[in-house]
Amino acid sequence: MKNKKSLLALVVVLLGATTMSSCQKTKVTEKDGIEYTYIKEGSEKAPNGHFLLYNLQITNGSDSVIYTTAGQPMPGYLMANDSMPATNGMDEIFLHLRKGDSIVFQSTAKTIFGQNVPPFLKEDETVKVNLGAFEVMDETAIQAYFEKMMSAEDSKKSERAVEMLAQEAGIIEAYAAEKGLTVQKTANGLYYAIETEGTGEATTPGTTMYVNYAGYLLDGTLFDTSYPEIAKANNMFNEGREYGPLPVNVGMGQVIPGWDEGLMLLKNGSKAKFLIPSPLGYGEAGAGGMIGPNSILVFDVEVTDVQK
């Protein structure tokens, strides 16, 4: 694990609400003049090379959340290093954190975020920060901790995917009925319609297929295609792109799960339509600006060649 130049970039997880007390201590950073108040003051300093775990929440002047780590799988962390210089007030605060510290402060967005002010904020806008350090771990312990947290998050993600498959099944079936499509459904939740049967042997994992395609959102928005004429018709043509069939080693995880499964059902010359629920597409993360989180995808595909 490597320490980053910008300590703020390491923040993850929410600091719970705290109550002000009469024994608050206030300090001011030498750089940037940030005035920060200890709601609770800790005592354990992380040894060099060890990791300090912390929680953080950032709000604007009207207490609307700008950044919250609530629901994130892991907290923020930084590696203790006494020789690391503080280049700004935020660095000073983070470098002096001790286990048990609970701190609140506010300043301008420019002071808090530096060169990375979010586009929805003005540089002179007030930003409030709640910060709390809660644990010190060596490298072995933090690796084990993160593995445990990621395993738990993977389990939760799998549960959410099952829920999304159930929710999106009705949406996909309604779409198919509206478009007059006769579709079949795989055990994994992929909907497909084979419009032209291909020829040749059944497809096996590792087979290389050359596939032309056009990908749409449910509202008909084209987000990608290998056909130049479709790209031009939708004002998406890119002069610098080479259009044509995409080579895919089927069943090897090179493409989204819906494609991997769907292409296994096709042969050379096949034409088909895939209706792909989000867990078999780009899931919770989405892909780029056009494919948002939990997007159902529609693909027209044509297999132009098969090589085994």
Image (tube, rainbow, N blue to C red):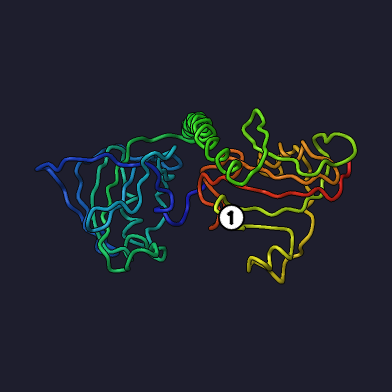
Determine if residue 98 is in view: yes
Q: Residue furthest left?
A: 22
Q: Please give the residue where the numbered disc 1 appears in the rendered image.
A: 220
Q: Quadrant of residue 229?
A: bottom right
Q: Amino acid at mark 1?
A: Gly
Label 1 element class: loop
Residue sitting at 26 percent across and 55 percent down? 128
Is 264 left or right of 52, judged from the image as shown? right
Is 73 left or right of 123, judged from the image as shown? right
Q: Which image quarter is the C terminus in?
A: top right
Crowdedness near tag 1: few (<14), some (14–19) or many (≥20) residues, C-alpha within 10 Å: few
Q: Position of residue 227 (x, y in %)?
A: 74, 60
Is 126 left or right of 186, judged from the image as shown? left
Give the answer, above or below, for where 305 lies relative to 61. above
Q: Position of residue 11 (x, y in %)?
A: 40, 48
Give the answer, above or below, for where 223 lies relative to 196. below
Q: Quadrant of residue 244?
A: bottom right
